[in-house]
């Protein structure tokens, strides 16, 4: 359980205090302050339900990595005032579900739309009852502790050949490389897009991924053509959109604080019998990309660290 989950668990226990229940019988979902909000989370802002509504049992925040939504308890008088102002909706919405397959067990189940896999439960109730869903049962040791690979972990899925058109020409302007990468996700400069990956996580795709900034915040360069990366940016996009595996582990940020890091791994077959390994790592604050040719198995295993969130079916 991370810090935000622990806070929300404690918050739920406060909301269930008999005195609070008597004075403030209604629960109101509030959207957080995310810079680029999840549309469904935003649509739930102001939704009012009872404490025993099944919807709040699956939608009590947090509802995914980086979700900052919260729930407040309101009085009957507050409810009536909100209704008169036309800014309150009572009752749970029906947004449907999507199918998610556990990469470790192969088991498929339905998850409410708008919620990342493993987050469709009430962390407050789980903390009081000692019940944690399978997706979160020791998926990753606490920061600073070793996370050994499963002993029966198979090799990465087979290499997939690449369309030569996915390798861009040499010598393009860095912005051209960026534009083509963004287009893979339906984004453009100045118009970022949220992308939901194969494991259910969200990545914000924007031109800021490639901007080098000075201490004052001004843009002073581009990462797009660093280390001859530009030619292979579409392969980096492929690693995000259709990876062989997705892992999560801990990373230390420049601020000195630990954070969860997602790693997207993919192997691609090039012409002439060459093989490229691509890795995209994302912490929410920054990213790091790696492209390497004809790598050895021990090199690959070094990058398969933490908890496995997704594995491509063979």
Image (cartoon, grey):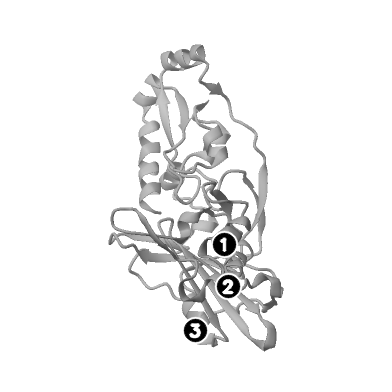
Query: Horizontal and vertical percent for residue 206?
Result: 51, 53
Contact check, label 3 and label 2, Cβ < 8 Å: no
Measuring from the top left, give residue 12's x and y in whole percent.
40, 37
The 10 Å Cα crowd at callout 3, few under 14, some 14 to 19, many 20 or more, is: few
Query: Looking at the image, which is closer to me, 103 or 263?
Result: 263
Q: Earlier in the sequence, mark 3 or mark 1?
A: 1
Direction from residue 196 to residue 149 in the image, left or right? left
Residue 35, quarter of picture? top left
- The residue where tag 1 is placed is 176
Question: Which one is closest to the eye, mark 3 or mark 2?
Answer: 2
Q: Which is more N-terminal, label 2 or label 3? A: 2
What separation in Å lies between label 3 and label 2 (alpha carbons)? 23 Å
Check disc 3 and report its element: helix, strand or loop: helix
Q: Earlier in the sequence, mark 2 or mark 1?
A: 1
Cα–Cα span, label 3 and label 1: 32 Å
Element at label 2: helix
Kindly identify which numbered label has been placed on residue 231.
Answer: 2
Label at residue 290: none
Measuring from the top left, give residue 198's x and y in whole percent.
61, 59
Task: Tell me if residue 149 can be seen.
Answer: no
Tell me what residue is drawn at x 59 percent, y 30 percent. Answer: 92
**Label disc, if present, on residue 299 of the rendered structure:** 3
Q: Is residue 306 above or below residue 154?
A: above
Q: Residues within 10 Å of mark 1 (few under 14, many from 20)?
A: few
> What residue is drawn where x is 50% and y is 80%?
301
The answer for how far apart the CA atoms under marks 2 and 1 are is 11 Å
Residue under the point 67% across and 57% down: 108
């Amino acid at each position: 359980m991370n810090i935000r989950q622990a806070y929300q668990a404690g918050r739920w226990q406060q909301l269930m205090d008999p005195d609070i229940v008597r004075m403030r019988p209604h629960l109101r979902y509030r959207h957080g302050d995310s810079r680029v909000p999840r549309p469904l989370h935003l649509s739930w802002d102001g939704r009012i339900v009872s404490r025993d509504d099944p919807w709040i049992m699956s939608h009590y925040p947090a509802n995914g990595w980086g979700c900052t939504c919260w729930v407040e308890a309101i009085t009957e008088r507050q409810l009536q005032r909100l209704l008169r102002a036309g800014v309150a909706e009572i009752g749970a919405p029906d947004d449907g579900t999507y199918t998610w397959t556990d990469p470790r067990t192969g088991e498929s189940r339905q998850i409410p739309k708008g919620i990342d896999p493993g987050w469709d439960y009430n962390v407050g109730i789980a903390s009081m009852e000692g019940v944690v869903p399978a997706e979160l049962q020791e998926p990753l040791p606490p920061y600073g502790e070793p996370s050994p690979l499963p002993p029966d972990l198979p090799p990465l899925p087979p290499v997939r050949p690449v369309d030569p058109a996915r390798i861009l020409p040499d010598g393009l302007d860095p912005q051209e490389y960026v534009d083509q990468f963004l287009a893979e996700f339906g984004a453009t400069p100045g118009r970022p897009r949220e992308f939901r990956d194969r494991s259910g996580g969200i990545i914000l795709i924007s031109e800021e991924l490639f901007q080098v900034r000075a201490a004052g915040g001004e843009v002073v360069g581009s990462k797009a053509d660093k280390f001859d990366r530009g030619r292979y940016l579409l392969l980096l996009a492929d690693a995000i959109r259709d990876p062989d595996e997705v892992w999560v582990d801990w990373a230390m940020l420049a601020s000195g604080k630990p954070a969860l890091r997602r790693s997207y791994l993919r192997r691609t077959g090039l012409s002439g019998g060459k093989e490229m390994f691509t890795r995209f790592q994302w912490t929410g604050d920054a990213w790091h990309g790696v492209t390497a040719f004809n790598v050895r198995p021990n090199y690959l295993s070094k990058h398969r660290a933490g908890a496995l969130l997704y594995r491509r079916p063979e």
